[in-house]
Image (spheres, rainbow, N blue to C red):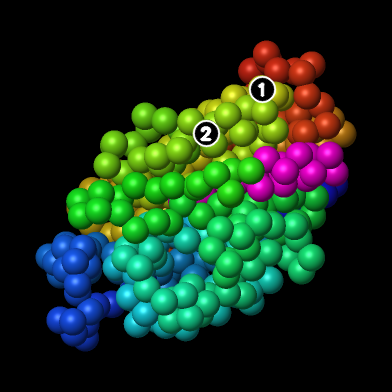
Amino acid sequence: MTELVLAHLSDPHLTHLGEVRGRELLSKRVLGYLSWRTHRRHVHRSEVLDALLTDLRGVAADQVVVTGDLTHIGLPREFRQAAAWLPRIGAPDRVFVIPGNHDAYRWAPWSETFALWAPYLASDPGAPAASTDGRAPLPTLRVRNGVALIGLSTARPSPPFMATGRIGRAQLEALGDMLRTTGERGLFRVLLIHHPPVPGSIRWRKRLTDAPALGAVLAERGVELVLHGHAHRDSRLWLPTPAGRAPVIGVRSASMHGPDAARRAQYHVFRISRRRRGWNVRLSVREYAPEEHRFTPVDAWEVDSPGPRQRGADSDREMETETET
């Protein structure tokens, strides 16, 4: 039986802004810095991320995906901090990063920002891709154990007090082609994105502005699983595809430590396995336990998928099965 163990974490906000100079805080960045100074630095904690890294080693994931917001305000100094942190998770061929809106808080030179993460953003060698800016090939694609990991970037600078994202026409067109070709190969397709793609699932100022256009592509070309972050909350929703409904699963921030237990740091571990007919996905939710200073399993969930080769016949059947912890 083919199986892929996939760990998903998001929104670690791992950087520190203690030595930022005033000239670095132009425009919207001053608001982000004040947010970090008064709130974010107290709830996004390095000791939580240390515990997560320890737990990840025990999970022994085949691939780790990070769906954005490694930084707070997207400064080059933060990209350097994150570039030093990523090898602690693993080598670039085992760690796949998708940008978030905080990573593109304001415009900054590519060579001083995302270029520092290039090996972790990269597709497999030879993977087909379009490019939206001449530097980053998007969408990105990695194939592991029969599973296609497809990364989209929704990271765009937005006005003050807004945290919206946008995919854009070039990525959407390339995504349609990529979903078609990977589906024809019978691969289980996992879409990785920062912003929640289900319209109405997040506040207007934080939404994905072209979510309906993405939904139309998925409804035509199909996808088996969608993973996202951004909201700092766990969620399980659905989007229509030609084979039925595809689960859309959001994960909390990987570093959150505060009084609200409903937002306490979590990450997800998926076991995606090929069955005689279709695929099976098992999810284990692992949450930070402050009293024990470690991550522990708190929930489990399971779903069957017909996969891209079995469209239509099972489109009306209920695919969800609940598993007790």
Q: Percent from the top left, x then y, of residue 46?
A: 34, 73
Q: Nearer the viewer, residue 206 or 325?
A: 206
User: Callout 2: few (<14), some (14-19), or many (20+) C-alpha neighbours within 10 Å?
Assistant: some
| Residue under pointer 2 | 213
For the residues carrying marks 2 and 1, which lies nearer the camera in this image? 2
Three-letter residue code for mark 1 = Gly
Query: Looking at the image, which is closer to me, 34 or 180?
Result: 180
Residue displayed at 79% across by 16% down:
313
* Residue 10 % position (x, y): 45, 57
What stretch of residues is rendered in magenta? 174-194
Provide the secondary structure element on which disc 2 rests: helix
Q: Which mark is residue 244?
A: 1
Q: Is residue 166 above or below residue 21?
A: above
Q: Is residue 2 left or right of residue 66?
A: right
Q: Amino acid at mark 2?
A: Ala
Q: Is residue 137 magenta?
A: no
Residue 128 visible somewhere in the drawing: yes
> Label 2 vs label 1: CA separation?
18 Å
Q: Residues within 10 Å of mark 1 (few under 14, many from 20)?
A: many
Image quarter for residue 185?
A: top right
